[in-house]
Amino acid sequence: MKNIIKIILSLVMCFSLLGCQNQTEPNRTSSTQTQDHQETVEQDVTSKESKKISVTSNGQITIFELNDSQAANSLYEQLPLTIEVENYSDNEKIFYPPVDLTMTDAVSANAVTGTLAYYEPWTDVVMFYEDFGSASGLYELGQAISGSEYIEDMSGTIEIEAYLE
């Protein structure tokens, strides 16, 4: 009789343990799913973070925050660049990227001090150090977020790199 009771108790304990194991299994899956979801959200936030570039000339650094256009992305993909900057007019500096920028979803520029733009007819990138306005074929790439006061003094060879904070 004692042996039968021991066997019954052993079976009850085994079934209880199996039941507990099945209950914890979904929690493990939920935890994994939650972790996967968090990683996906973090990747989305990272991919939506804006791209920034630094332009170094004469020891001074100007940081531009790029917009989300294909034109801005195609400039970013060419980095790093060591390139000649030129004066143009009395309010801008220009340079010619090695590869023409993609204009699929380009947004017309209304250039103010610190605007980074692309002038498609001449395939040059423009950095404005004074307000300009708009022109046919002028597309915005981004805006200076620091160092716009250095654009006017840029000369010679400049270094353009992805800016990682």
Image: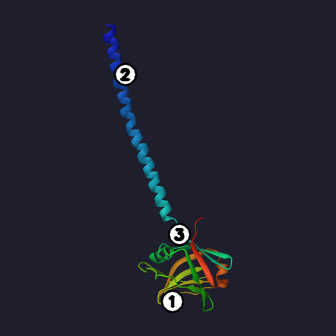
Q: CA distance from mark 2 to mark 1?
A: 82 Å
**Which percent across, then down, holds residue 101?**
46, 80
> Label 1 sits on what residue type?
Ala
Residue on which the image places disc 3: 51
Q: Earlier in the sequence, mark 2 or mark 3?
A: 2
Question: Percent position (x, y) of residue 87?
Answer: 61, 89
In depth, the one of 112 and 21 nearer the eye is 21
Residue pictured at 38% horizontal, 32% vertical: 21
Q: Residue at x 46, y 53 (%)?
A: 39
Of badges 2 and 1, the one in the foreground is: 2
Instruction: Determine contact: label 3, label 1, CB under 8 Å.
Output: no
Dot 3 surroundings within 10 Å: few (below 14), some, or many (20 or more)?
A: some
Quadrant of residue 106 within the rendered picture: bottom left
Q: Which mark is residue 13?
A: 2
Residue 29's x, y, as percent? 39, 42
Depth check: give the residue in front, 154 or 27.
Answer: 154
| Residue at the extreme top | 1
Q: Which mark is drawn over residue 135?
A: 1
Determine which of the numbered discs, if any, sits on residue 39 in the image.
none
Residue density around tag 2, few if under 14, some if 14–19, many if 20 or more, within 10 Å: few
